[in-house]
């Protein structure tokens, strides 16, 4: 379900144009938005028709109605992909195969889903480690001289990278010193939400479009006695990408274009009255 | 109780096209910090927390029906999106 400050007839036109099959809810006096505490108060109440929009975000709720995940960004450009929302709501549809049943060294794999990435739509880059038994990797914060697990991206004006989501670390107390380290063991999956702003799109001969996602995974593996040298793994993925956002892409075929101007004028007028 | 301050993000770069880029390189006609691009910098409120029950939502839908979000989902999970507008 989706909620906005639009009038019902504007939502009806939008639903028809985009073949929307879920309810679009109208909150024209932004009463619900305000009650949720997410009214964008940076906009002046006299600034029509912008005043009344929320800080944009999405809640995932479980069968008991309890919030299990939230996706909020500070701007209207970035938004979660259906892939991210479905994973949050239903769990992984595809169970990730272990990289190895019994790894003898740390194995790393970097992958992303097959859905093309629209401008501003966030998809998770999935970085997986298989850590041999007895070894561990480090999460932040790490003691001086040690290397925490990290995913770095090459400089690229078209690539947008949001903070990585790490699994919870396990506290690991070093015998003798009492120092507590924050470690990862076994199969470790890190997700990095990424998208693009359209500036680094590349075209293939067949007209299809992609972005190149390049970077380096860093880690250091240790056991209780010995630390191995810090390691790095370069990755370079060709990711299908679209120069437009989902909004344009999802327009139903042969649908009548909604009259944005009329709705916009009416919306402004009502607010000024 | 004093309300927690929300700062405004005003980072903006003028692109050769005449459009304005925000901190993510996204182009738009409005300068970041103005009108629909009045975005927060740092902390901003995001409503109910993970682990809390989503507050009740009863509103009119695009079909004109009154929808109660918790009733409609019929004991299943749901995704609830708060977005800017269907018009712009």
Image (cartoon, coloured by chain):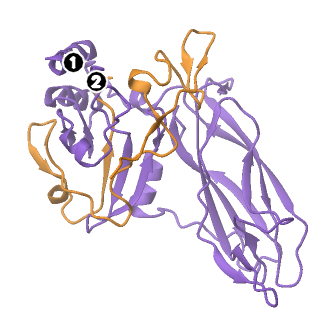
Return the x and y of residue B85 as percentages of the image width and height: 30, 30
Helix, strand or loop at disc 1?
helix
Q: What residue sits 65% from the left and 53% below the top?
A: A111
Element carrying mark 2:
loop
Q: Residue furthest front?
A: B1
**In the current view of this chain or complex, which residue is farthest to the left?**
B65
Which of the pair A155/A95 is nearer the observer? A155
Label 1 close to label 2 by CB (< 8 Å): yes
Image location of residue B50, percent across then percent down: 38, 62
Q: Which mark is residue A263?
A: 1
Q: What residue appears at the point 78 percent right and 85 percent down from the top-left corner? A: A174
Q: Residue A58: horizontal and vertical position, in percent?
A: 37, 48
Residue A180 horizontal side relative to residue B78, left or right = right
Q: Is residue A264 above or below residue B70?
A: above
Quadrant assignment for the C terminus of chain B: top left
Subunit that carries the residue with mark 1: A
Q: CA distance from mark 1 to mark 2?
A: 7 Å
Q: Name the residue at 38% across, 32% down.
A: A42
**Quarter assignment of residue A197:** top right
The answer to whether any part of residue A11 appears in the image is yes
Q: List x then y, in percent, for residue A51.
A: 29, 27
- Count up the numbered dots: 2
Q: Residues within 10 Å of mark 2 (few under 14, many from 20)?
A: many
Chain letter of the residue beneath label 2 in the structure image: B
Q: Are the residues under badges 1 and 2 in a single subunit?
A: no
| Residue A70 to residue A25: above or below | below
- Residue corresponding to mark 2: B87
x 18%, y 17%: residue: A272
Q: Which chain did the renderer colour purple? A: A
Residue A226, placed above or below residue B60 = below
A214 or A53, nearer to the observer: A53
Chain B color in figure: orange
């Amino acid at each position: 379900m989706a909620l906005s400050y639009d009038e019902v007839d504007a939502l009806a036109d939008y639903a028809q144009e985009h073949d929307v099959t879920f309810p679009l809810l109208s909150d024209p006096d932004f009463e619900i938005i305000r009650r949720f505490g997410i009214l964008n108060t940076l906009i002046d109440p006299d600034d029509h028709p912008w005043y009344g929009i929320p800080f944009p975000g999405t809640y995932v709720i479980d069968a008991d109605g309890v919030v299990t995940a939230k996706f909020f960004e500070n701007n209207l450009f970035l938004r979660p992909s259906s892939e991210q929302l479905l994973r949050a709501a239903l769990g992984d549809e595809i169970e990730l195969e272990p990289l190895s049943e019994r790894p003898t060294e740390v194995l790393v794999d970097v992958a992303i889903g097959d859905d093309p990435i629209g401008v501003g739509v966030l998809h998770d880059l999935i970085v997986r480690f298989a850590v041999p038994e007895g070894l561990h990797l480090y999460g932040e914060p790490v003691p001086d001289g040690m290397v925490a697990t990290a995913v770095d991206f090459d400089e690229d004006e078209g690539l947008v990278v949001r903070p990585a989501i790490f699994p919870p670390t396990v506290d690991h107390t070093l015998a003798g010193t009492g120092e507590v380290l924050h470690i990862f063991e076994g199969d470790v999956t890190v997700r990095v939400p990424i998208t693009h702003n359209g500036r680094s799109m590349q075209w293939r001969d067949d007209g299809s479009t992609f972005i190149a996602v390049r970077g380096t995974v860093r880690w250091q593996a240790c056991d209780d006695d010995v630390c191995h040298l810090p390691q790095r793994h370069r990755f370079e993925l060709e990711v299908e990408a679209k120069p437009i956002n989902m909004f344009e892409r999802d327009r139903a075929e042969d649908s009548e274009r909604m009259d944005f101007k009329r709705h916009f004028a009416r919306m402004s007028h009502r607010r000024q009255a | 109780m004093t309300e927690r301050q929300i700062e405004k993000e005003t980072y903006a770069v003028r692109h050769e096209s005449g459009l304005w880029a925000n901190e993510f390189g996204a182009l738009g006609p409005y300068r970041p910090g103005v009108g629909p691009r009045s975005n927060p910098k740092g902390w901003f409120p995001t409503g109910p927390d993970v682990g809390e029950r989503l507050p009740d939502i009863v509103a009119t839908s695009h079909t004109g029906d009154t929808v109660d979000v918790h009733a409609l989902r019929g004991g299943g999970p749901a995704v609830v999106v708060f977005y800017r507008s269907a018009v712009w």
